[in-house]
Amino acid sequence: MIIPLLKGLKLTLSKFFSKPITIQYPEERLDPAPRWRGIQYFVRDEKGETTCVACGLCMVVCPSGCIYVETAEDEQGRRYPSVYELNTIRCIFCGYCEEACPVNAIKMGKNYELVGYSRDEFILTTGRLLEEESLNT
Ligand code: SF4
Ligand code: SF4
């Protein structure tokens, strides 16, 4: 009767004095695993703009149907997304969009803090996706 009690006390005391496995979030943050698929970001070119050529492959491959792209062309004939919207509420973070992109313009990031006060805040536009890049460099 006393032996199991002592064993339990020993375990409790060893955990009491060992290094904590929890962290003081949000003051402290854990680095996610290297293969973690977090919030997407757009890779910038040398001018700081998106390298996306608005081919729409990510939109086609996305199993959740959460990407919407409209294509436009600038004076030099370069294609760019006049509208790019990624609805993170519907996203399942499968990473297919990153895999399908022929120019490596979209990447799965390491940011896991997906919070907001309105639904609109969860729609990532070109600007938001470029802002996300700074969290991944
Ligand atoms: S991670 Fe998957 S579900 Fe999310 S936008 Fe990319 S393809 Fe769609
Ligand atoms: S992010 Fe990549 S796959 Fe998606 S529209 Fe742009 S270039 Fe095409």
Image (cartoon, rainbow, N blue to C red):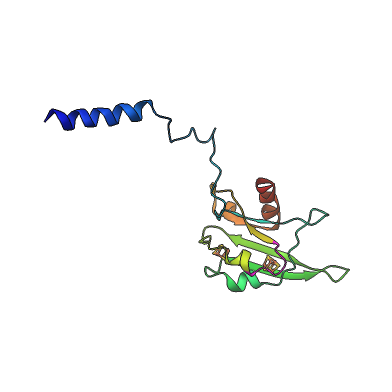
* Residue at x 54%, y 50% (from the top left corner): 118
Instruction: Please state, as top left, top right, bottom left or bottom right, where the N terminus lies in the image.
Output: top left
Q: Quadrant of residue 41?
A: bottom right
Q: Position of residue 34 (x, y in %)?
A: 57, 51
In the rendered structure, the answer to whether residue 2 lies left or right of residue 46 reads left
Q: Would you say residue 70 sits in the magenta stretch?
A: no
Task: Give residue 14's position: percent from left, percent from top.
Answer: 33, 28
Question: Residue 101, position in %: x, y?
Answer: 67, 68
Residue placed furthest toward the right: 76
Magenta span main SS: loop
Classify the position of ligand 1 by quadrant: top left, top right, bottom left or bottom right. bottom right
Q: Is residue 13 left or right of residue 41?
A: left
Quick one: 93 or 129, which is closer to the camera? 93
27 versus 118 height, above or below: above
Q: Say left or right for 134 vs 27.
A: right
**What is the total number of numbered labels drawn onto the structure image?**
0
- Residue situated furthest left in the rendering: 1
Q: Residue 74: horizontal and vertical position, in percent?
A: 84, 67
Vertical comparison of 87 with 14: above or below:
below
Question: Which span is picked out in magenta?
Answer: 100-105
Nearer to us in this view, 2 or 126: 2
Whether 101 is among the magenta residues is: yes
